[in-house]
Amino acid sequence: MQVPGLIIWWMGAAAGLQLLAGVLPEPQAPVARINGVAVTSGELDAEIDRLAPSSVTAHSKSADKAALRKKALDELIVRELAYQKAKQQKFTVPAAEMNATVARIKGRYRAAGSFNKALAADQISEQEFLHRVEKDLLLRKIYKREIDDKSIIARSEVDDYYRTHKARFLEPESAWLLQVYVRESEEAKSKADEALSKLKSGTPFFDVAYTYSEDDYRVVGGDYGWVHRGQLAPDVEKLVFSAPTKRLIGPVHTSFGWHIVQVQEHRPARQLPLEEARPKITDSLHRERLARAREEFLKRLRENARIEYLAP
C-alpha cells in the first residue's frame, strides 16, 4: 500500500488548484536543485506518472517521453519555488486546518494500523508526511492570493465587454431538429419510405431513427437539438428551415441521401440579452485573467531563482 500525499498542480489555462491523493516516492538521487533544495528522481517519476500513467507512456516515442519529463520537472520546480515564496512571506497553516487535513487523509485507511504500515513500507516518517501536508496547504494559499484573487471579474467588466462586442451575441435563426437520415444506396429510398410508414403508424421517432437512421445521431433517436442557419449543408438547411413545425417532411432527396425531418420548434434570430450572456462572458474573461496571472506569477518566481539541472 502506498501513502497518499497531497499533490497540487495547475489546471491548464484556468490555473485553478486541486488537491488529489497521490504517491509519495521513496528517497532517490536529486535531478534538480532549486535554491539549494533537491528534487528527487522519485518525485519526478511520481509526477510523470500523474501527468501520464505508465500504461500510456510505455509505448510512447522517446521524444514524447523527454517532453513529458521536462513538463513534470517544470511542475515540480514551480511548486518548490512557490513553497519557498510562501515561507518567505510568512504564510502559515492554522493548527485546525492542518489537523483536519491530516485526519481526512488518515481516514482513508480503515484498518487499524494500516496508515502507519503504509508509511513504513514507503520509508516515510510521520514528520516527513506532516511536512508534505503543510507544504501543499501553503501552496494552496499562495496560489489563491497570487492567482485566484487577482483574477476576479467585476460585473462592470462583463457589462463593458457585452457593449463592446454585442454583435458576437446575436443568435441566428434556429430550429430544433429531429431527423432520420439514410445515406445514398440502391435500397436507400425504400428504406426511407419504410421508416416514414413506421412514423405515420405511430411508432415513436426515437425508435424509428434508432432502427433506420445511418448517422451518428441514430443513438439519440435522431434528435439533433437546436441547429442554426449556417450550420447545415445548404440543401439540408433549406429543407429544415422551410419545414412547418411538428410535421413529418420526407423522404426528401439531397446530395447526401434521403431525409425525413420533423422540426419541433423554430426560433427566430435574436440578440442574446446581457444576463443570458453574462455567465459565458464571465467564464471567458476569468480564464484569460487566470492564465495571465499564472504566467506573471511564474515569471516573478523564476526571476531570481537559482535552478540547477542535474544529470538523471
Image (cartoon, helix red, strand yellow):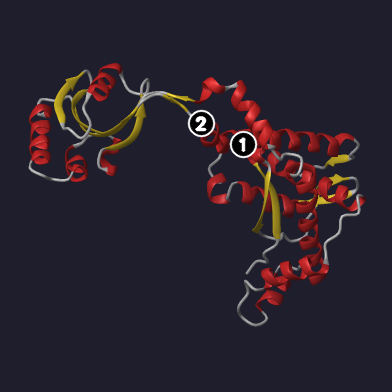
Image quadrant in which you'd find residue 305: top right
Residue 136 position, x and y percent, is 76, 56
* Picture quarter with the N terminus: bottom right
Q: Which residue is mark 2?
A: 273
Instruction: Identify the residue at image location x=53%, y=46%.
Output: 56
Instruction: Identify the residue at image location x=53%, y=33%.
Output: 277
Residue 17 position, x and y percent, is 68, 49
As drawn, 132 above or below 199: below
Quick one: label 1 or label 2, which is nearer the N terminus?
A: 2
As drawn, 268 above or below 58: above
Q: Name the one closer to the observer, 229 or 288.
A: 229
Mark 1–mark 2 distance (CA, rounded to whole Å): 14 Å
Crowd band around label 1 with a 10 angstrom C-alpha radius: few (<14), some (14–19), many (20+): some
Instruction: Identify the residue at image location x=91%, y=54%.
Output: 90
Residue 251 position, x and y percent, is 13, 27
Q: Which mark is residue 282?
A: 1
Residue 191 position, x and y percent, is 10, 33
Crowd band around label 2 with a 10 angstrom C-alpha radius: few (<14), some (14–19), many (20+): few
Q: Name the one closer to the observer, 250 or 83.
A: 250
Q: Looking at the image, can residue 125 be seen?
A: no
